[in-house]
Structure formats: structure tokens, C-alpha cells
Amino acid sequence: MRADARRNRSAITSAALLLARERGEAVSMEDIARAAGVGVGTLYRHFPDRRALLEDIAVDTLRELLDATRAEVGRTPAWAALLRIVDHCVALPLALTKSLITSEPERPELPELEVEINALITKIAAKAQREGDLRADVPPTEVVRVLNVAVCRCGARADDHLTRVVLDGLHTPKN
Amino acid sequence: MRADARRNRSAITSAALLLARERGEAVSMEDIARAAGVGVGTLYRHFPDRRALLEDIAVDTLRELLDATRAEVGRTPAWAALLRIVDHCVALPLALTKSLITSEPERPELPELEVEINALITKIAAKAQREGDLRADVPPTEVVRVLNVAVCRCGARADDHLTRVVLDGLHTPKN
Amino acid sequence: MRADARRNRSAITSAALLLARERGEAVSMEDIARAAGVGVGTLYRHFPDRRALLEDIAVDTLRELLDATRAEVGRTPAWAALLRIVDHCVALPLALTKSLITSEPERPELPELEVEINALITKIAAKAQREGDLRADVPPTEVVRVLNVAVCRCGARADDHLTRVVLDGLHTPKN
Amino acid sequence: MRADARRNRSAITSAALLLARERGEAVSMEDIARAAGVGVGTLYRHFPDRRALLEDIAVDTLRELLDATRAEVGRTPAWAALLRIVDHCVALPLALTKSLITSEPERPELPELEVEINALITKIAAKAQREGDLRADVPPTEVVRVLNVAVCRCGARADDHLTRVVLDGLHTPKN
DNA sequence: GATGAATGAGGATTCATTCAT
DNA sequence: CATGAATGAATCCTCATTCAT
């Protein structure tokens, strides 16, 4: 792949990611192309269609999240690892990602990555329970769902009120 | 208003509500009409345009929520009242409602109703704090936001894991 | 025909005539019905369709013009008769009438009436030529066309500049 | 602008001009596109909406008429210049142009061009009066109105009966 | 016989996608 | 390879006409 092609591809991905975050899933291809500084034709050279572009963004997103999550496996205390993962999610368009996964995506990586990430988080959650920081009455697999919701709304950060409340709900009360 | 007109109007509202919940805000008028068993023309006789139809649903929704909330003001314990309100929200398309309010609606009732409902919930939350059931370190006005999120995702129920965790996060721990 | 039916019919005709004059041929049936103070259904009871209504107005119009023209036949001087006919046309929606006749009307009366009116005017014009008031080098049948145009634009009156110029063009110059 | 785009744009303009002349202002975008041999999308690439297309035609028309009129200023005899201008108008859709100017057009050029053209014609008319060819009792500004009407109906030519009559009405009789 | 609600074909417009330059 | 013009299916909306009340 030529240097300019690679540059274009990443310009498109960045623009799409930005616009998708701003205006939701309803971005037009024309707008993405304009924001990336290329013609629509170039966009379609890199991605066969709209869905492919969005799914590609989602795959990139999840791969990055997988890496970040892998880096946290085994760290102690596990509870702090969970908090770092949540913080990491803030910048990611997980709402878009979620909606794509739900609607039968072309790319098999999408559900696969989700499964893999969830498995890792479940593992970390189980460890946090053993360490006594995570409520024991919530199944570790459920922790994932809870975090998902806390994180999918825009701009969740581990230190704002809402997320704090959610995390407090998961945390084992220390008297 | 004639009997059949009333029947059609409510068929349209129901269909729109259902589809909006299923497929988000992107429902086509054609689809709503088909689901309601009427022609598009009938839609437009009852509602001047797409936006008017959706806003009308939202107003109905909020009016109903306001009624339900009013019925809970003053009941004791206030914490239980909050739980009942959350349960009530499950069936309502609050995500749609929220997005309409955000985008400069035509109908002034929409923001007005929201303000009124939030004021009542804030009042109930304050009472719950005085009664020692709601965490004192969360401002009552913030409780509204937390509940909003817990409830806007589809299918929250006060007894499912996610909502329980959120509510647990708000609840005062009894040792 | 019952009294109220007759009243409705004429209310519809009047309203249609008024609106057609104001907003051109693009009046909606709904608007005509509203202006006439009846429901659309009533409108369709009296006239099978839009075209029928408009053609009916046109027939009425031309019948009235025929009567007025007949009254002028034989009067002297014929030139003065022509001027009175022109003045009479001001209040009539002749532009609409013309456009209906051009587009293959259902009602045979329309072309028939036009032919009959034109024949009478031609006759009067020939007389005016014999009396020395109308230019001899314009065929009498052509006078009709000239008057038509002078009169079809809105508001021609025998004493406004445009019409005066046209009539002056027809008039025999008296030295 | 690419060659094919320019070709398409002018095909659209020509088709629209033709159809507007034939069937009045009520031409559908679909029909214009078909007549131009392009898809509707192409229409909308060149013109943001229906009104823009029609106004564009009108601007082109008036610009051309302005050029033609400018070329006649100062020529002698002025009366012959007026006749040439009238002849030039035959091919132009001045009726459409007039109706657009009346209805608050977006493009400011439209009224501006009209004013400019009328000023020039008024000037030529005044000269024709000084030269003794144009009736002195018609104000030069009024000449414009008279010519407008003579010309706005389809197919006026300086040598047909109607126009001749109108022009004769304006002309100073030579005995 | 009057009413106005329902219908749906038709017109304007948008946008994902294809293709000539 | 990049570009942006062309395409046409899909969507919103209007209005002449039909039909239940």
C-alpha cells in the first residue's frame, strides 16, 4: 500500500470516528469524505460500503480496547484495573460499536472481539471478588453489562457522579 | 372527533411508539402507517409532519410519567416511591423523548414537563435523604440524572441486575 | 333541486371563481370547499371532478359574456359597443377560460360559446369598419384576438394606458 | 467544471426552458430530468431546488435581454431599435420570468436586471419620442409596460397582427 | 344529502453507491 | 489512484378523489 493511500485511509477513519461521535450513526458518506479531505470515490476505494467503514472503525476500537484490557489482566488490585479500563473506554465510540454488533455485522471479528474482551473483564472481575473489592452477589459476567451501560452514554468518567454511583454499586462497602 | 378517527389516531400513536422503541428514531412514516393499518395520508391528517408525530408521542409519555410521579409525592418511605417511579419508566420510550427535548422541539410542553417531573423527583429524593435511605453525598438533582441513565436504556426494571446495582449505588448501606 | 343544494352550488361556484382569480389555476379543492363553507364531499356531489368544476365556471362566464355581447349587436356606433364589451370583460376570469378551452375540454359548450361570441364580435367589428371607426386593414376576425390579449391580463379597463394604446392601434385615426 | 457536467447543466437548462414554455410553471423535476436525459440527482447537483433552477433560467434570460437591449442604446432611429428589441423577446420565456420576479425571488439579480432593462428601454423610448416616431402622450415608462404585455404572451413577433396593432397604437401616425 | 376522514398516486428532495474523467 | 459527477431508490409530504358516518 502506497504512503498516500495509507494516509488517506487513516484520515477517513479518523474523520468518520469523529463525526460518528458528534452526530451519531447518521453521518453521510459525503460529509465523512469532506471532513477527511478526500473525494467520495477515495472513500469507496478503501471501504466497499457504508457499513464496512463503520464496522472497520468498530473493529479498530475493539482491538484497542482488547489490548488495553489485556494489559490489565493479572494486575493487582484487580478493582483498580477495572477502574482503569472504564476510564479508557471514555474516548471510544462504544455506543456505535454496540449497535453494529447487535445488527448482524459482516465482519466476524466484531462479536469475537466482544466475547474476548468480556471474558477478560469477567476474569478480572472474578479476581476483584476474590480480593474482596467487588460485591460478591453480582455474577462476574453481569459486571460487564453494568460497565457497558455506565460507559456507553457519552463522556462517562470514573470520577463523575453517575459513574461513581454505578461503581459504588459494584464496590464492596468497607465499613 | 369521529369514532374511526379516534381509533386511527390511537393506532398510529401505538404503532409509532412501538416502532420508535424497536428501530430508534429512524422509522419511516410509510412504515408507521403500514403498522397502524392506515394510509400515509391518514398520518398526515392527524399530524402535520414527522416531527409533530414524534413530539406528540413524547408529550403523551411525559404527561403520563408526570401523573405517576405526582401520585408518589408525599408517600412514605420516599425510597420506595423512587423505586416505583423507576419501574414505571420501563415501558416508556424515554430515550426518544430525551433526544427530542434536546433538539429544540416545537412543543413547549416538552421541556416544561421535563422540568416539572425533575423537580418532583428531586423533592422525593431529598425526602429519601432525610429519611436516611438515599446516600447523602449525592445531590438530589443528580439523582435525576442517575435514574435517567439507568432507565433510558431499554428494559430497565428495578429488579434486574443493572438497575439493582445502580440503585444500590444510591442506597444508603445499612450495616 | 332543493333550495339548500342550489345555495351550496352557487356558494361553491362563487368561491372557486374568486380563488381562481386570486391564485390562478392552482387552487386546491379543499380550499375552495372551505371558502364556500361546505365540506369537500359536497363539492364532489355537485361536480364530478376538479376539471368539471373549473369548466363549469368557464361556461357560466362565457354564457354571461355571450349575453352581454348579444345586447350590443346592432347598437350604434359599433365602436362604442366594442368599448363596452371590453369594459365588461374586466371582471371575468378569461385567462382561466382560455386555458381550459385550449386543453381539450369535456364540455362542448366551451368552444361553441367561444365561436359564437367571436362571431358576434366579428360582426360588430365589421360594422365599426363600415362606420369608419375601426382600421380597415385589420381583418374583423383578428380584432377578436387583439381584444382577447388586451383583456386577458388582469384588470384591463378601456381607460387604462395599455388598453387605450391597443384600442388606439385599432381605431381609425381622425385627422 | 468537467466537460460532461457543463453539457448536462446546459441540457437541463434547455429542457427546463422548453418545458416551462410548453406547460407553464407546473413542470415536474422528474420530467425535466427525463427531457434532459439525466437522472433527478443530477438536477439537484446543479441546482439546490426547483426554485433555484427556474430562477437560474430567468437570470440567464434577463442577462441575454439586457445585452441585446444595451446593443440597441444609441442606435438611430430609436423606433427601429424598439422594434428589434420586441422581436428579440419572442424567443424568451418572459411570462415565467415575470411571475418569478413577482414572488420574492432568492436571487437579487432578478429585480435588478428588470430595473436595468426597463431603464434602458425607457431611455430608448424617450429618444424615439424626440425623433417624432413614438406618440408623445404615452409616458416613456409606460411604453415598457405596454411592450411587456405585448410580448409576454407566447409568440409575439413584430410582424404579427396583434403586435402590429399594439405598435401602431404607440407609433406616431404619419399622414 | 352533508360531512370530513381515509386513501394513495405523484412530486420534491436526499444520499449511498457507481463510473467517467 | 483520486476525483466528483451521475444515478435512482427511498423518504417526506400534498392533494384529488372515494367512502364511512
Image (spheres, coloured by chain):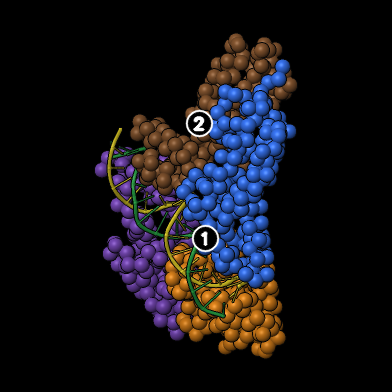
Chain colours: A blue, B brown, C purple, D orange, E green, F yellow
Residue D100: in sight, yes or no? no
In the rendered structure, the answer to whether residue D34 lies left or right of residue D47 reads left
Q: Position of residue D21 (x, y in %)?
A: 47, 72
Q: Which residue is mark 1?
A: A49
Q: How many marks?
A: 2
Residue B169: in sight, yes or no? yes
Q: Residue sitting at 55 percent across and 62 percent down?
A: A47
Q: Position of residue C75 (x, y in %)?
A: 39, 68
User: Which chain letter goes with mark 1?
Assistant: A
Q: Position of residue B94 (x, y in %)?
A: 55, 33
Vertical arrangement, residue A134 with respect to residue A19, above or below: above
Observer-nearest residue: E7 or C83?
E7
Residue C140 got which mark?
Answer: none
Residue at the far left in the pictured view: C1
Query: Where does the N terminus of chain D fall, quadrant-wise?
Result: bottom right
Q: Quadrant of residue B119?
A: top right
Q: Amino acid at mark 1?
A: Asp
Q: Which residue is mark 2?
A: B155
Q: Amino acid at mark 2?
A: Gly
Q: Position of residue B168 (x, y in %)?
A: 62, 22
Q: Quadrant of residue D120?
A: bottom right
Observer-nearest residue: D137 or B40?
B40
Q: Residue sitting at 63 percent across and 82 percent down?
A: D68
Q: Are the residues under marks 1 and 2 on the same chain?
A: no
- The kind of secondary structure element at disc 2 is loop
User: Which chain letter goes with mark 2?
Assistant: B
- The kind of secondary structure element at disc 1 is loop
Observer-nearest residue: B44 or C115?
B44
- Mark 1 and mark 2: Cα distance apart in space: 32 Å
Q: Residue sitting at 36 percent across and 54 percent down?
A: C50
Observer-nearest residue: C112 or D45?
D45
